[in-house]
Image (cartoon, helix red, strand yellow):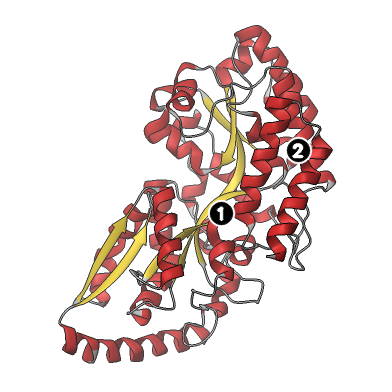
Amino acid sequence: MAQRIFARTLRMSLLWLATGLGAAFGQTVLNIAAFPAVDEIAKAAIPAFKKKHPDVEVKITSRAFPDHHTAMTTALSTSSNLPDVMVVEYGYVGRFAEGGGLEDLGAAPYNMQAQRARIVPFAYAQGVSTGGALVAMPTDIGPGTLLYRTDILKKAGLTEADLTQSWDSFVNSGLKIKSATGAYLVAHARDVKDIMIRADLKTGEAMYIDKTGKVLVDSPRFVRAFEMAKKVRDQKLDGKIGAWSNEWSEGFKRGTIATQMSGAWLAGHLNNWLAPETKGLWRAAQLPEKAFASWGGSFYSIPKGAKNKALAADFIYMMTLTPELQLAAFKSQDAFPALIETHKDAFFDQPIEFLGGQKARLIWREAAQKINAVNVHKLDPIAEEIINTELDKVLDQGKDVRTALADAKALLERRIKR
């Protein structure tokens, strides 16, 4: 019933747009702002959208990931050069959600809240502001996973269980890997911290700042993550290699990096462009200690200043709630679908050639089912920067872990009071 009401509301709105704006200004243009590879996913869906709206031109503006979010931040703050549809990555949802510049997609006339049960719970929650508004509709998710090189483990006399039994076992395996092969356990010690602070958060909890404004970065979760990252660095088990650098991709190609923890989407990047020549050497596993964490994910939003809101809503509805399009994005761009009904598709049972024929999508599906819904905060991106700065001081300058976290907490508390 809710879906029929929504569709009827959209048809009425679109009719108004077609006869009103279309007549006044000629052909209507739906402007979409995105980053790779969501831009390619949106581009591939244009023919399906044109079947419903043959008189609408779809224009996609694509920028590199950081440039896109910088441009969107500026557009929202100045209410100028706003697209009709804005793609937002998970790390920026909190900031944009609390800025007040996005439409509530859960309320009328959009009524997307009626579709909540169809979306992976943790992803839906990530798009909700502290005030309860659905400002970002999830399209793909990033179940956390551990990717590892089987050839390196074999040389070191290790098994997958040695990596995943516990975080201590994971680090101890790094010592054997370094001794037997010379390879680093991880590219950067920060990777360990990044996953550990996200792992096993309970429903309703927050990563850095809770909904009451309490700063959480001196909690046992952060202490343990910092201490484990420090242990990795102290034992020279990381290459101090930043993600997305040339050295990073070379490390994967040459086998000097044994593991990488990230979202499941990274397996696709390794296959498609980072290290395609390593096909068959990688496998996927759940994170150490059977931890479950979300890493990344893409969302669609509508700025309040958008010109074609009804068309924008129809596009978002199509992209997020059409099983065929969600699966097409998964198959072409490794965009793990947020739409639950797609998770029963036979594609999940297919072996992945790059991962040596492993049925890794079943592992990632299990993770997606077990990740809890956590709250976002507008200062999350700033909190991440502060935490990373303090971790660098611990790793590179020998700063005490608890002192570093106390300093991070104090700085964040000052930001909140501004």
Which residue: 68% across, 59% down? 415
Which residue: 66% across, 46% down? 386
Identified by mark 1, the residue type is: Gly
Ranked by sequence position, the earlier of labels 1 and 2 is 1
In this view, 152 is above or below 109? above
Place of residue 105 in the rendered image (x, y in percent of width and height, measured from the top left) = 51, 77
Which quarter shows the C terminus? bottom right
Which residue: 54% across, 26% down? 241
Identified by mark 2, the residue type is: Ala
Q: Secondary structure at mark 1?
A: helix
For disc 2, the marked residue is: 225
Q: Is 28 positioned to the left or the right of 203 in the image?
A: left
How crowded pointer 2 is (Cα within 10 Å; few <14, some 14-19, many 20+) is rated as many
For disc 1, the marked residue is: 91
Place of residue 93 in the rendered image (x, y in percent of width and height, measured from the top left) = 55, 62
Who is closer to the viewer here, 108 or 331?
A: 108
> For the view shown, which residue lies furthest in the top direction?
180
**Could you give the CA–CA distance between mark 1 and mark 2, rounded to whole angstroms?**
19 Å
Q: Is 295 positioned to the left or the right of 302 in the image?
A: right
Q: Secondary structure at mark 2?
A: helix
Place of residue 31 in the rendered image (x, y in percent of width and height, measured from the top left) = 30, 68
Which of the 4 image quadrants contains residue 394? top right
> For the view shown, which residue lies furthest in the left direction?
26
